Amino acid sequence: MKNDTKINQIAGYVITKNEERNIQRCIESLSKITGNIVVVDSESSDNTIKLAESLGALCFINPFENYSKQRNFAVEKVKENFNPNFIITIDADEWLTDDLIDDLNSRISENYLDQYDIYLLHRQINFENHTLKWGGFQKTWLPRVFKKDLANYENREVNEHLSISPEALIHKLKGYVVNDDVMSWEDYISKHNNYSTLEAKERLNLRVNIDQKIDLYQAVKLPHLRRRYLRQHVWDRLPAKPALRFIQIYIVGFGILDGRAGFHRALFEAWQEMCTDLKYQQLINNN
């Protein structure tokens, strides 16, 4: 039974699409922080909704348009139903480590969660039953806990982010949010093939609407946007990006030290980069 302090301070949400293999682990992890959880589902054809409801989540079905709209819809449902001070979100294929849960619960129980506006979670990627410790994957911090009034996602097809003010107070939490989404290679490849389609569309959109690009001021003030700034202003202009991506991960980032998993992940990232490039070029040719 969750105490009233937890319930009033924080609620969570998850967006889903055919996640019956992952959703129980995800919700059970979030429930160690809060009993108030919203699931927004993109018309799953499996038992995702049934499982989520059995675990106490409040579920809504919303046809998928893009990730930003889906997340903003979820945020509104959290506000309408629970009106928390803070919102936490993780993906359906993620869970929180004990250290992270303890850090958050300590801040909640002692009523000092509101010392900061946004909390960054350190992402840990498990790939082929191996924790990736190299290749640059170990350096990712994500804004996943935030005050409800700051909960607005920018309009992007994919790789959406919170619209964060440079004045927001940001803090890093202990522990990890673990990502482990390779349950089926067929599903994994299909999902990331779709991501490359969305990323190609977003790249074309930035070419047309240059005012949506991250500027240097934002990148300096908001560390979690620096990677996107470099991608938009440097990376996307480089030739032979698939080969460069492999070298970046496997050689420069020492992904070779992650063994076979590191090699396969570098290859996979290079493949996705190639798919994005090819689809982007086709979009340009068709416009």
Image: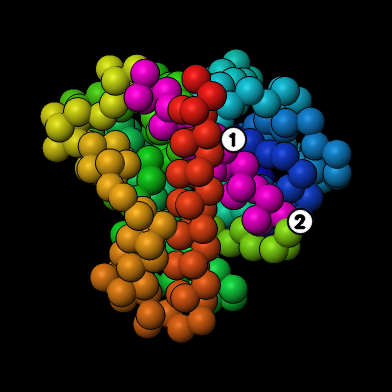
Q: Is residue 275 left or right of residue 42?
A: left
Residue 190 is at least partly visible in this image? yes
> Is 188 on the left-hand or right-hand side of 261?
right
At horizontal 72% and vertical 32% (from top left) the residue drawn is: 41
SS category of the residue bearing label 2: loop
Front-most of residues 203 and 51? 203
What amino acid is at disc 2? Arg
Q: Which residue has dot 2 on it?
A: 21
Q: Which mark is residue 242?
A: none
Residue 133, image x, y percentages? 38, 73
For residue 162, what is the image quadrant? top left
Q: Is residue 208 left or right of residue 127?
A: left
**CA distance for labels 1 and 2:** 18 Å
Say if 11 sits above or below 83 in the image: below
Given the image, on which type of amino acid does mark 1 rest? Tyr
Q: Nearer the viewer, residue 92 or 216?
A: 216
Query: Residue 143 at what x, y percent from top left?
Result: 38, 40
* Secondary structure that dominates the magenta span: helix
